Image (spheres, grey):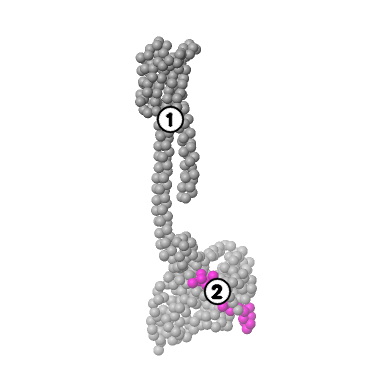
Amino acid sequence: MGFCLIAGLLLLPAMWFYLDRLGHQQSERLGHILVTQLAEQAWQPLLHQDTISLQVVVNNMVRNTDYVLRAAIFDVENQLQAQSSSGQPQTDKHNSYQHSIALENNAAGHAELTLDVAHIEEDVATLFWSLLFTWLLLSALLCIALGMVGGNISRRLSNIIAGLPTQSAPILDDEIAQLEANIKPLLVKPQTRDESDDEDRTSLTLTICCENIQRLQAQLTQENFRHLLRDFEAVADCTIKLFAATRLPGSQNCMHLRFYCEGDKDNALLRAVSCYTAISDMVRASAPRKGTGLTLCAALRATDQHPEDSQFLQDQQHELTLQKLVKTTAFADPWQLLIQASLLDDSETENSILYELLLNVEDQALFMALGTEQQASLAGQLHYIRSQLPELATPLISGVAS
């Protein structure tokens, strides 16, 4: 819109000069046409020395033709034969035109005509101001229309931002930047897996062990125990969807999640670590009272699959991997995550995942924390998960099995 206004202002002088030149050309053309017409009409009366007819001709020219101030016919001796004037006051802005009258190739006189150029310039100015007013009116209507459309878009963006579970500080009243800031924590890189594509089947497997599930089952009433597991399942399902994981059948009080790499192992590693961190934070935060919540620990390692192997061998390899992960969780303290050290050695996520190598466990590293940027994203993701699970705010029913 600003470009259109600036372009219009720059074109105004050019349009004025063009209209002024066009008015001048048209006045010259009109003057030559009218004086030629006057000479042709005066030829016959001048031949017969009919002054009455000559007077009628000049009178008609002045009365019936716009912009004509004066018309006159002169004989060959430059004697005035007939003259008519509009009676309007003469101004400096007028042009005079002459045209000879010939009788059988012999000059018999000439015709004179005076045009009022001031009126033509007024008409040109009226046309210019009309165009300028029309342009201003259309520009104003366009500004109003753009303002209404922009306001509607702004309101819709504000409604979308208000409906998002993540909220960040306002960014200079820029709704698009605000929307980007609020939606960024939810933009987990999508991982699409084509079952027919066997070129890259590398994946990461995360095993989450519920250490105290058997003790809780013995201590809590059956209703409380089922309520606790339903809450845990709700947290796990919502988090698994957010971080694009695939849940595998569980074993030995453990839940197994698979994260397909699809050529980007660092992204899968970051998603797996963030997934466990989100689940553990949600479980710890939603524990109704101390001593009655689940206690988790986890292990993460790569799962290499070879498409050329038979399905039987692949299933065996998968089962061995899960057994290794279950055994690895035994070395983890409550709420700890052990990661296969070789994954971190080959990774480019040094600033995203903080860890410490373990000396007493071969090829294992203890996850310490996420980097600053990942922690900010995780905060938004946790806010989203909580917004999807409002029922977790309901306290657990009290009671312990006798």
Find residue 261 and report its image quarter: bottom right
In the image, 317: left or right of 7? right
- For the point 51% across and 82% down, the residue is 211
Instruction: Give the amino acid at mark 2.
Output: Leu
**Lower sequence index among marks 2 and 1:** 1
Relative to 166, residue 9 above or below? above
Q: State whether residue 8 is above or below residue 365.
A: above
Secondary structure at numbered mark 2: strand
Residue at x 45%, y 71% (from the top left corner)? 383
Magenta region? 357-379
Of residues 8 and 143, the one drawn nearer to the viewer in this rendering: 8
Where residue 152 sits in the image (x, y, percent)? 40, 56
Q: Determine the residue positioned at 52% across, 66% down.
A: 188
**Left or right side of 287 for 200:** right
Q: Which residue is mark 1?
A: 92
Mark 2 surroundings: few (<14), some (14-19) or many (≥20) residues within 10 A: many
Q: Residues within 10 Å of mark 1 (few under 14, many from 20)?
A: few
Q: Is residue 314 visible?
A: no
List x then y, in percent, for residue 141: 39, 48
Task: Give the residue at mark 2.
Answer: 370
Q: Residue at x 52, y 82 (%)?
A: 334
**Image height of 318 relative to 88, above or below:** below
Whether residue 213 is visible: yes
Q: Is residue 243 magenta?
A: no
Q: How far from the left and from the top, in percent, is residue 371?
A: 56, 73
> Who is closer to the viewer here, 400 or 81?
81
Q: Amino acid at mark 1?
A: Asp
The foreground one among 299 and 165 is: 165
Q: Is residue 352 above or below residue 43?
A: below
